[in-house]
Image: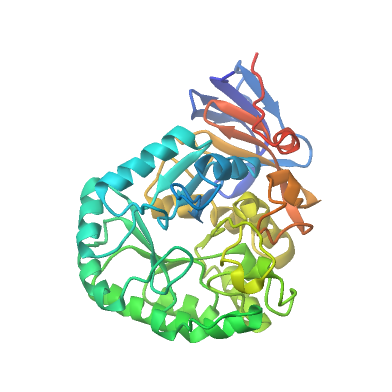
């Protein structure tokens, strides 16, 4: 049953500050906020003592694998997992088969998402050359990329020589264009038997060189470009100097090659896990406010036994909100900035002024979290047989409710049942 009028009462993060307020949502939009509204509703949520309502997360970088003939995953399976973690909006990357590199395949993928996704999916258009970039911009794509500068899973590299022509089709008021900053010429194709060999194949200079070259192109061709899953503080510094936005992943902040079993294929990712000093430097950049966004780079794969046979990529879109709150609780990031990295900042990059805040006139997408430590369990998200590095990890901020328009989900019950459980209105 849909709850056309939802009343939320309790501690709510509004404008970056925790306030005791009541929020009234009607037909999926926030219409009133006040200390005492005295309004009737189809469903009233009164928050518990340790519960806090925040804007529902936006994950700027996921791979749902739809359409793709070789994966048993897709918009239905992956968006259900995101929902179980309180996420309401994701941006899906284009390394699919077929890739959305023409207006036709782009529209087909959008329709596939509308028909199957449990939450909103923003489809990113695939960049292959300047002509397809021009056509996708004309077709209305407001996100392009991930543009791979180095070969990765199901993603051939876009030749560096073609980038100036691609940049000519971009503009400061055009689409957000997301880049994977590793340079193919500096990446080795040797087999890797462990994380150390994988790291050697994709060295730090492959990333910093790519970031530097992109910064130079940004100066010559003003545009809205964004670098995803950067792993090095030097990359952040170069990007900031060129007014380029960046995101980092939870796995690059929480893990390094010295903290995990180097032969465990769960941790095989592109770009690779780095050393401890790189990880700590990246955390310092986050605390300084130099990193714009936290994004999961959720990339599902069935876990295989042999390191060499396992594709690169891990899942983690389900825990993006607890990851942000863990950065607040354990690593000194302010609550305001931790939540902003997964809400209002990605909304601003996307040009979506209807998302990212609890405010009148915004969409009613609000997640309630229990502000305490909890243990992440892979089975609660259906991740037992996949590359999910967070199983058994203690995190802070357990998602317990999600308001997504006119639907209100009990997330704890949903995780228990393995499917969305909607709270009934009166």
Residue 341 against residue 31 in the figure, above or below: below
Foreground: 385 or 294?
385
**Is residue 167 rendered to the left or right of residue 424?**
left
Identify whether 360 is placed above or below 138. above
Task: Point out residue 122 in the picture as x, y percentages from the top left corner.
Answer: 42, 46
Please say whether residue 201 is visible from this viewpoint.
Answer: yes
* Percent position of residue 162, x then y: 25, 73
Q: In x, y percent, where is residue 61? A: 49, 56
- Residue 13: tell me if it is visible: no
Looking at the image, which residue is at 25% across and 47% down? 103
Location of the N terminus by quadrant is top right
Q: What colouring does the structure picture have?
A: rainbow
Number of marks drawn: 0
In which image quadrant can residue 18 be found? top right
- Given residues 391 and 412, the one toward you in this image is 391
Residue 350 against residue 370 in the figure, above or below: below
Q: Quadrant of the C terminus?
A: top right
* Residue found farthest to the top: 426
Residue 48 horizontal side relative to residue 97, left or right: right
Q: Nearer the viewer, residue 60 or 152?
A: 152
Q: Position of residue 71 (x, y in %)?
A: 53, 51
At 46% across and 67% down in the image, what residue appears?
Answer: 246
The foreground one among 67 and 391 is: 67
């Amino acid at each position: 049953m849909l709850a056309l009028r939802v009343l939320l009462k309790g501690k709510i993060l509004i404008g970056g500050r925790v306030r005791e307020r009541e929020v009234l949502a009607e037909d999926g939009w926030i219409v009133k906020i006040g200390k005492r509204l005295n309004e009737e509703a189809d469903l009233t949520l009164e928050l518990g003592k340790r519960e806090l309502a925040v804007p529902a997360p936006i994950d700027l970088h996921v791979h749902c694998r739809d359409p793709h003939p070789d994966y048993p995953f897709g918009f239905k399976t992956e968006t259900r997992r995101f929902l179980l973690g309180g996420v309401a909006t994701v941006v899906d990357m284009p390394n699919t088969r077929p890739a959305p590199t023409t207006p036709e395949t782009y529209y087909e993928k959008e329709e596939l998402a509308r028909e199957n996704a449990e939450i909103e999916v923003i489809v990113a258009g695939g960049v292959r050359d300047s002509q397809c970039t021009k056509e996708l911009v004309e077709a209305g794509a407001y996100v392009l990329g991930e543009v791979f500068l180095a070969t990765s899973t199901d993603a051939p590299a876009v030749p560096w020589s073609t980038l100036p022509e691609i940049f000519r089709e971009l503009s400061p008021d055009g689409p957000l264009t997301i880049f994977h900053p590793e340079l193919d010429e500096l990446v080795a194709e040797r087999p890797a038997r462990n994380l150390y060999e994988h790291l050697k194949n994709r060295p730090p200079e492959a990333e910093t060189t790519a970031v530097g070259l992109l910064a130079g192109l940004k100066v010559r061709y003003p545009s809205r470009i964004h670098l995803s899953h950067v792993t090095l503080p030097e990359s952040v510094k170069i990007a900031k100097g060129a007014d380029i936005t960046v995101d980092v992943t939870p796995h690059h902040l929480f893990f390094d090659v010295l903290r995990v079993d180097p032969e465990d294929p769960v941790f095989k990712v592109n770009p690779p896990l780095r050393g401890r000093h790189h990880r700590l430097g990246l955390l310092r950049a986050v605390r300084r406010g130099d990193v714009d966004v936290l994004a999961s780079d959720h990339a599902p794969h069935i876990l295989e036994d042999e390191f060499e046979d396992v594709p690169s990529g891990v899942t983690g879109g389900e825990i993006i909100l607890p990851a942000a709150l863990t950065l607040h609780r354990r690593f000194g990031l302010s609550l305001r900035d931790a939540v902003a990295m997964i809400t209002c900042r990605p909304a601003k990059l996307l040009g979506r002024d209807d998302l990212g805040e609890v405010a009148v006139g915004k969409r009613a997408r609000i997640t309630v979290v229990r502000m305490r430590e909890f243990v992440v369990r892979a089975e609660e998200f259906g991740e037992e047989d996949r590359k999910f590095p967070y199983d058994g990890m203690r995190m802070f901020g357990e998602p317990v409710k999600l308001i997504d328009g006119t639907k209100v989900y009990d997330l704890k019950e949903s995780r228990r049942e393995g499917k969305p459980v909607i709270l009934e209105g009166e």
